[in-house]
Amino acid sequence: MFQEKLKLVWQRFAHIDWILLGALIPIMGAGLMTMNSFSEANLLFQKQLLWIAISLTVFFTLSQINFQFLRSTRVIVVIFAFAVSLLVTLFILGSVVKGAKSWFHIGSVAFEPVDLAKLALILLLSKYFSRRHIEIANIRHILVSGFYTGIVFVLVLVQPDFGSALVVALIWIGMVFVSGISKKHLIAMFLLAIVGFSLLWSFGFKQYQKDRILTFIHPLTDISGRGYNAYQSTVAVGSGELLGKGVGYGTQSRLQFLPEYQTDFIFAAFAEEWGFFGSIIIVFLYAVFIGRLFFGAMRGASNFEVFFGIGLAILFMSHILVNMGMNIGLMPVTGIPIPFMSYGGTHLLMSFVGLGIFMGMRRSARPVGREAVNNEFLGF
């Protein structure tokens, strides 16, 4: 009887990518250990542990739902309109945190709607490109999809949240690219991006955002001011050397030289404790995670599922590369978390919402061939 029940449970969750989930568990564990090393007094470890439990519950629940209804244009439009309305409402009811009006505060709970907006945008672009990918050479489809993206991009940029706006732009660029854009349109997009950046520099960016970019170009010109965060982060990563200083012995974080070590710079705090080898393991686990997303996307039951999986991979990959880049001094400081490792309930929850939807879509995935099974570990 017990074996039959166990078999039924396994069949119920057989469509879940356990390799993908298995790669995330040690990443979340690394984040928890880093928080616990320096944050006993403010209970970040306990709070994050609770958010992980909630997020995993949501993940497994969503994985049991048949998401074919998301193929409906009406449903997608409602989700996108709701996400955009939340971004607009921020300017009326939102709270200013670290200079950006990006959060709703309801009692002791804070919610950042930009993470929902990113998922809504991926759904909208997946629907749009799944119906028009054959005609993507037509510049009109690039402009229309760019208009949808521009709505979210502008609303996020004026908060101002440059990091999230950058991720929104990367989602659109990545999904347009995999849709089969022509070379001449790719060049046109590149030139348009240069013009857009020039306009943003002149009329859009706040002074502190310009300072971050200038500091990225000349990081050592003001290490006690504008370049302090980037400098302390690179010091933390470098001081970890090969094997690290050991858990709880990261001086840059413990002595609070490294700012935001539980969120934006948690990778630097981890690298200081675990060194180069520990950092390589985290990078490898992220690579497995992203590879499994692409592998699962290629098995989508329709073009919509394929584009959604690819969009989700681009979302996470953008966060990972930008965050790690700013932690090691290769990218300007943009203030975005690294997925599944940084402290934060909203981002973690919405990340697992996206993965839960993706796993629900796998219930109707295309069968995979023998060659793909042989290479299934990394998803290549």
Image (cartoon, rainbow, N blue to C red):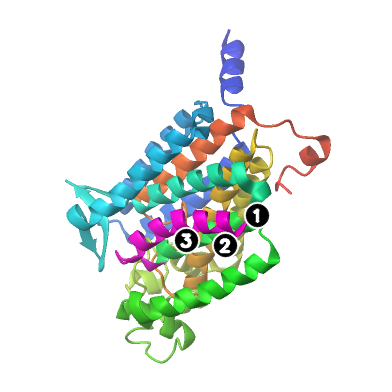
From the image, give the main secondary structure of the stretch colored magenta: helix
Q: Residue furthest top?
A: 1
Which residue is the site of mark 3? Answer: 167
Mark 3 Cα within 10 Å, few/some/many (few <14, many 20+)? many
Q: Secondary structure at mark 3?
A: helix
Is-magenta flag for residue 144?
A: yes
Is-magenta flag for residue 140?
A: yes
Which residue is the site of mark 2? Answer: 278
Mark 1 Cα within 10 Å, few/some/many (few <14, many 20+)? few
Q: Which mark is residue 54?
A: none
Q: Earlier in the sequence, mark 1 or mark 3?
A: 3
Q: Earlier in the sequence, mark 2 or mark 1?
A: 1
Q: Residue furthest bottom?
A: 221
- Identify the residue at image location x=32%, y=73%: 255
The span from disc 1 to disc 3 (Cα, nearest Å) is: 17 Å
Which residue is the site of mark 1? Answer: 178
Q: Which residues are magenta?
A: 138-162
Left or right: residue 219 versus residue 48 is right
Left or right: residue 249 versus residue 173 is left
| Residue 358 sits above or below residue 134 on the image | above
Mark 3 and mark 1 in contact (Cβ < 8 Å)?
Answer: no
- Identify the residue at image location x=63%, y=42%: 306
Q: Amino acid at mark 2?
A: Gly
Q: Nearer the viewer, mark 2 or mark 1?
A: 1
Q: Earlier in the sequence, mark 2 or mark 3?
A: 3
Residue 246 makes an appearance in the image:
no
Q: Amino acid at mark 1?
A: Val
Percent across and percent down for residue 121 are: 46, 49
Residue 191 makes an appearance in the image:
yes
The span from disc 2 to disc 1 (Cα, nearest Å) is: 33 Å
Percent across and percent down for residue 6 are: 58, 17
Q: Secondary structure at mark 1?
A: helix
